[in-house]
Image: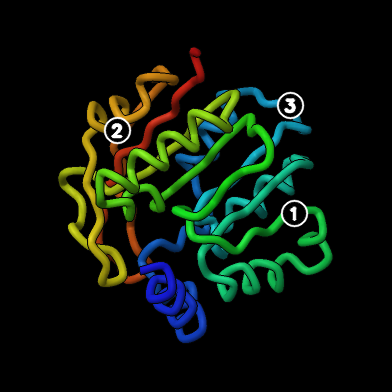
Amino acid sequence: MEVSNKKHWDSIYETKTPEQVSWTQQTPEISLDFIHSLSLDLNASIIDIGGGDSNLVDHLLDEGYKNITILDISAKSLEKAQKRLGSRSNNVKWIVSDMNDYEPTSQFDLWHDRAAFHFQTSDEQIKKYVKTVGKHVSGFLILGTFSEDGPLKCSGLDIKQYSVEQLVSCFEENFVKIQCKNHDHITPFETIQNFTFCCLKRIR
């Protein structure tokens, strides 16, 4: 599965522009609003899971954050982001890995994931993800998934939909809800995808 998923995503990033994929956001407003509400130190350790060539890293760098990691299964997506950022890409740590295989070597003050967690569709994958987060996130968790009113697939792959309650309950052993909201994402081709977004705080 890992190899086929990697080929799948590499092919997409090789053949499509940001205007041709549904997840593109010029300004990731919900994520940024949640991050701003946390008043993190600029030296806080931040990781963006499935960050690909998302514009979130551009905004974080603009705001002065100094300890940013971007993880994605697709090397092609990270190459696009690095090219866009130019010399500023040297200020970011880039990791090519399937989330299922990722074993962090440090703690993170903020774990951000917009639309990667919902690709974990089996109980085994979900439990491993939750365990990794529980072990390596010391501060906050921001997650965005398709809601129960959202699509059933993304880029031809099955996803798992979440309500606010379901998303919070996945991580309730170690995290408590700060705020959650549903959000209509307007794709570049003007379709609507409804997301569940939650910001959680470490409690134990």
Q: Nearer the viewer, residue 184 or 21?
A: 21
Amino acid, disc 3: Asp
Image location of residue 88, percent across then percent down: 80, 60
Depth-wise, is mark 3 or mark 2 nearer the camera? 2
At 82% from the left and 60% from the top, the residue drawn is 90
Dot 1, crowdedness within 10 Å: few (<14), some or many (≥20)? Answer: some
Q: In the rendered structure, are the residues bearing label 1 and label 2 in contact, judged by CB atoms less than 8 Å apart?
A: no
Label number found at residue 92: 1
Query: Mark 3 — residue?
Result: 41
Q: Position of residue 78 (x, y in %)?
A: 62, 67
Q: Secondary structure at mark 2?
A: helix
Among numbered discs 3 and 1, the one appearing first in the sequence:
3
| Residue named by callout 2 | 167
Q: Earlier in the sequence, mark 1 or mark 2?
A: 1
Name the side, left or right, on which 111 lies relative to 8.
right
Percent from the top left, x then y, of residue 140?
54, 27
Q: Residue at x 57, y 30 (%)?
A: 137
- Whether pointer 3 and pointer 2 mark residues with C-beta atoms closer than 8 Å, the reply is no
Which of these two is toward me, 114 or 185? 114
Give the amino acid type for the residue marked by disc 2 in the picture.
Leu
State which tag comes first along the sequence, 3 or 2: 3
